[in-house]
Image (cartoon, rainbow, N blue to C red):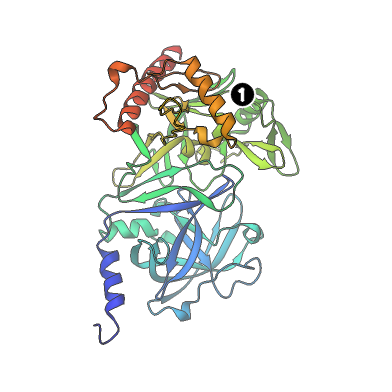
Amino acid sequence: MIREGTYGAYKERIRTEQLGSISQNVHDFSDFEYLGNITIGTPDQSFQVVLDTGSANLWIPGTNCITNCDKKRKFNSSASETFVKNGQNWQIQYGSGSASGILGKDTVKIGATGEQQLAIPKTTFGIADKVSADFKSDVSEGIFGLAFTTLSVNGITPPLINAINQNLLDQPLFSVFLEKRGNLQDVGGGVFTYGAVDNTNCGDIIAYQPLSSATYFQFKATRFRLGKYLNAKVVDVISDTGTSLLGGPPPVIQEMAIQAKAEYDFIDGVYLIDCDANPGPLGLTIGSHAYEIDISNYILDAGNGNCILGIFAFDFGGFGPAWILGDPFIRQYCNIYDLGNLRIANVHIMPFLEMNCLNLYNLLVFLLIARLGLLECRLLNDIADENERIRSLEKLIAKHDLRQLAFYNPGRMIKAEVIETDFNPSVDIKTMLKAALDKRAKEVQEEFNKKQ
């Protein structure tokens, strides 16, 4: 094979075929869209697509797509050695936008060329020759649907289910961890893990919920609340990575907007809100567990000092889910999409812990912000001025016993402590902190449940 020049291709094929799970880093665009890299064909043709649990078809633009496909990479079927022509027409309509073209079959790989990839042979996908105008201004180059075959147009088997059917994954599930990066473009924004649960970014599973419909990832929820408003109706909801905001029934959304003191912008079709507003967490109940979405996840920075309340009104007319739990919910909780057992889980996000040593009194001090069981680290290093960092550290030392590590939630002042009796120098600091965080998160959740 080396003499024939085929060893490289053989080695690549063996490497991809042996994968039982794969983690894919995603790119965040202003917290409004999360994209992942895929390739199609042999040799690879690369595309950056929306990884969408709210749809079930894969499509990318083809060479015949002229209108609204400016500056997009286009799939050239003639350049792929493994492409099989289908010839059947397809058309898909989304909540915003549409696409149409012909179908084809080829090898689809999750992941970028040169990175670890999951190769899925004989995958049917759409090659668009017509797309709606919104596609032109969108940064994506297609949609990678992750929902069930029953939702797909033309009954096409979605790529991931095709991988499951070919026994390419260790487990018939995937997990999603999304990050909040603010008004930044094309930055690391999370991880999709296929065939396994992401144990690096996702912590304890709160609970599994059975799907009420295996089309979308649809399940039951109730007690939607914000401020003094509560709607206790039990409804169907879906977890949708492809939707930037939280969508709900118009009357409920209107009441929540009133609670948040947000004003509707009829030009852009969004609710505008003061960037410093603090309407409190947006809550809901799934099964027997109460969940809260922090304002940091549902108030979005739109740039130029403008902020958007991350909710919108929609109505399926009683023939679909009443709520779309989009990216704000998934940034707050990791989601596990279990296709094999037809269930979904919401998972605490692991605390992101890093150390900052200012060599002041030879102490390691952590400044952490806690979110009702979901915790992330805010470093003193975030303060650019070194003198200001030292002053902040001195205030922290003066305010708290040096044996303690304090965790805060603004407005709630939650404090979890690693006291002297808990300290164990033989235990990894991250493990010790996580144990303290988990303990306090459980206590706070119990306190919250008692109030309901």
x and y, in percent, of residue 180 in the image: 52, 40
- Residue 390 position in % (x across, y down): 54, 28
**Badge 1, how many Cα within 10 Å: few under 14, some, many 20+?**
some
Q: Quadrant of residue 382?
A: top right
Residue 210 visible here:
no
Kindly identify which residue carries mark 1: 279
**441 versus 47 height, above or below:** above
Identify the residue at image location x=34%, y=44%: 198
Looking at the rendering, which quadrant does residue 149 occupy?
Answer: bottom left
Q: Residue furthest bottom?
A: 3
Q: Amino acid at mark 1?
A: Pro
Residue nearest the viewer, comparing 74 with 429: 429
Pick the front one: 378 or 103: 378
In this picture, residue 257 sits left or right of residue 367 = right
Question: What secondary structure is marked by label 1?
Answer: loop
Above or below, 109 against 444 in this view is: below
Q: Is residue 273 above or below residue 188?
A: above
Q: Is residue 152 left or right of residue 91?
A: left
